[in-house]
Image (spheres, coloured by chain):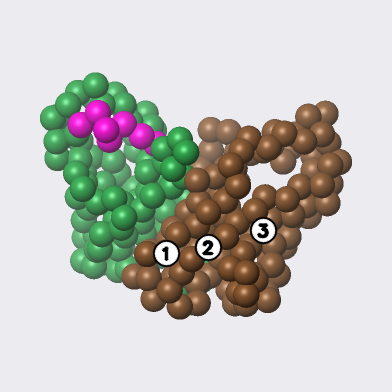
Chain colours: A green, B brown
Amino acid sequence: EAQVTQNPRYLITVTGKKLTVTCSQNMNHEYMSWYRQDPGLGLRQIYYSMNVEVTDKGDVPEGYKVSRKEKRNFPLILESPSPNQTSLYFCASNPFGRGLAETQYFGPGTRLLVL
Amino acid sequence: GDSVTQMEGPVTLSEEAFLTINCTYTATGYPSLFWYVQYPGEGLQLLLKATKADDKGSNKGFEATYRKETTSFHLEKGSVQVSDSAVYFCALSSEAGGFKTIFGAGTRLFVKA
């Protein structure tokens, strides 16, 4: 089944404790992206990657890191989480064959609470 | 920078009512426009899209037309069902804007039986 998977689905942590949220897609997509969803703000793009070893900042990259060492994986790293990073996070992928006119496929989401 | 503005919710309708959710945008170049839907507890899934001016996207009875002159992409459905209750997001993607995707704030729809 073609899908985007994220782990963990739920996470409670404390300020300053490094964490990684994994994202994997099995559709051989070129483009992958991370978003955060907050009430009243919709989804905001954190980082995106157009291919292996190619990443770029979205609109809200502060406090986050990403890497793209393999085509299928795009982990999101919070080196020192803070309470304002409490949010619902989505990973997405896109085949990018016709650029960003292609549909994005979203993972199920990771709900993060930073105390 | 690029932006998407959609009507605030929640929108509450009775079953079989007509639905319109307004969406307007500002963008560099010629963006692609999308409507995504999020059902409770799930990720987003594409509802419909349009990639150039005057294109009409349609799916599951929903429609939206890419209007460049009014920079709009309003979502419509002639007769809503209880199962349409969800959050609807308007979005644009523009390579001229830096290969990013911009989402609106979302509009929650409640449909009563």
Q: Is residue A89 visible?
A: yes
Which mark identifies residue B25? 2
Q: Rounded to the nearest whole Å, what is the CA distance between mark 1 and mark 2?
A: 7 Å
Q: Which residue is mark 3?
A: B74
* Residue type pointed to by label 2: Tyr
Q: Quadrant of residue A94?
A: bottom left
Indicate the position of residue B8 as horizontal and vertical percent values.
58, 42
Same chain for mark 2 and mark 3? The answer is yes
* Residue type pointed to by label 3: His
Q: For this rendering, which residue is in front, B69 or A44?
A: B69
Question: In the picture provided, is B111 more to the left or to the right than B17?
Answer: left
Q: Is residue B54 above or below residue A47?
A: below
Residue in the picture at 39% in, 76% down: B96
Q: For this rendering, which residue is in front, B104 or A10?
A: B104
Q: Earlier in the sequence, mark 1 or mark 2?
A: 1
Residue in the picture at 65% in, 53% down: B22
Indicate the position of residue A99 as horizontal and vertical percent values.
44, 74
Q: Secondary structure at mark 3?
A: loop
Q: Secondary structure at mark 2?
A: strand
Q: Rounded to the nearest whole Å, what is the CA distance between mark 1 and mark 3?
A: 18 Å
Q: Are marks 1 and 2 in contact (CB under 8 Å)?
A: yes
Q: Is residue A77 above or below residue B75?
A: above
Mark 1, chain letter? B
Indicate the position of residue A79 as horizontal and vertical percent values.
14, 40
Question: In the picture provided, is B53 more to the left or to the right than B20?
Answer: left
Q: For this rendering, which residue is in front, B27 or A23?
A: B27
Q: Report the quarter where the C terminus of chain A lies.
A: top left
- Which range is magenta? A82-88
Question: In the picture provided, is A14 more to the left or to the right than A2?
Answer: left
Q: Which residue is mark 1?
A: B2
Question: In the picture provided, is B49 more to the left or to the right than A37?
Answer: right
- Is residue A85 on the magenta stretch? yes
